[in-house]
Amino acid sequence: MFLTVMNFVTNSVQCMLKSFFEQRNLKKFLKQSKNLNSEQIKHFWVQFYGISTSALNQEINDNIFENNGEKNVLNLEKFESLNKEAIKNSQLSKQQQKIIYSLAGALAGFMALATQPQQSRKIWVIFTMTRALDFLYNGMVSRGYIPKWKYSYVLIFALINMLTVYAYSTDPKQVTMGIIKHYNFVYNPHKQDDLIRTTMIMKKYNHLKSKGINEEFNFEHAKAINKEIKPILIKAQQQYLKNKQII
């Protein structure tokens, strides 16, 4: 039921914003159009907003205007051409589409957050804010407004990731995933591969050692990585068991 209501509200907001931007684009087009008088603009608005043919014809006949002593009726061929051109110019730009989808998405996110339990609402608020900041940061980088790797901008991006990690790691259901994500994707994207490699190296080393064969087999590297990762995994497991008991 909630998803249905949220979908209805979001789509309604999208339609309202779309209509608003289309009307604004149309007004801008008519304002910039040359060789149009007030009567032509009036007739154009009548047709564009769906007045019936009979009502439109009556409206045109009732608004014959004088020009140098001659009666002139609105040129319907020119009217149709103007209508097509206006529809084309009233279409949404890419920037307007982004605004519509962003506002509708923000509304949907707000409604989703409003229904979350009090305990986890703060976590999801932080996560949503960091995703929004990440989106803005990447957008500014792609447009060239700010350099990707320079001065304080790297710190800003790092702060966004740290807050995201906090949002993950403080969620009882994702504490293990959060810490692993924090370690793997923030500091070293290849650390998961190193962990698997370390496990295989240690397993083979211990197997050879049990048979009296002392082979280095890159053991120092494996030992260093294992020493670095092991405390984090132990802490994650302890926290997971603790939260499981609370739940």
Image (spheres, grey):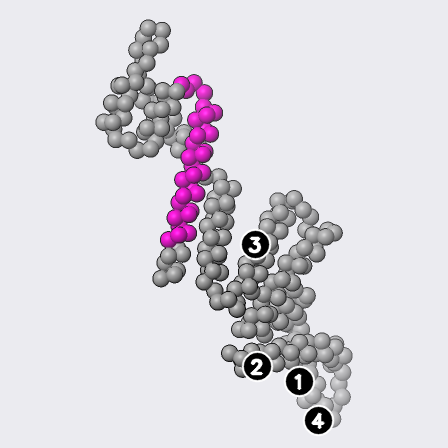
Residue at mark 3: 132
Highlighted magenta segment, given as a residue range: 8-37
- Label 2 near label 4: C-beta < 8 Å? no
Residue at mark 2: 241
Name the residue at the front extreme: 118
Q: Residue at x 62, y 47 (%)?
A: 140
Q: Residue at x 37, y 53 (%)?
A: 8
Res. 157 visible in picture: yes
Q: Amino acid at mark 4?
A: Lys
Q: Residue at x 25, y 23 (%)?
A: 57
The quarter of the picture where the N terminus appears is bottom left
Q: Name the spot of residue 161 as percent of width and height, x first.
A: 63, 61
Q: State the separation of the CA atoms marked 1 and 4.
A: 13 Å
Residue 45's quadrant in the figure? Answer: top left
Residue 219's quadrant in the figure? Answer: bottom right
Q: Is residue 238 magenta?
A: no
Name the residue at the bottom extreme: 211
Say few, some or many: other residues with alpha carbon within 10 Å of mark 4 (under 14 / 14 to 19 / 20 or more). Answer: few
Residue at mark 1: 203
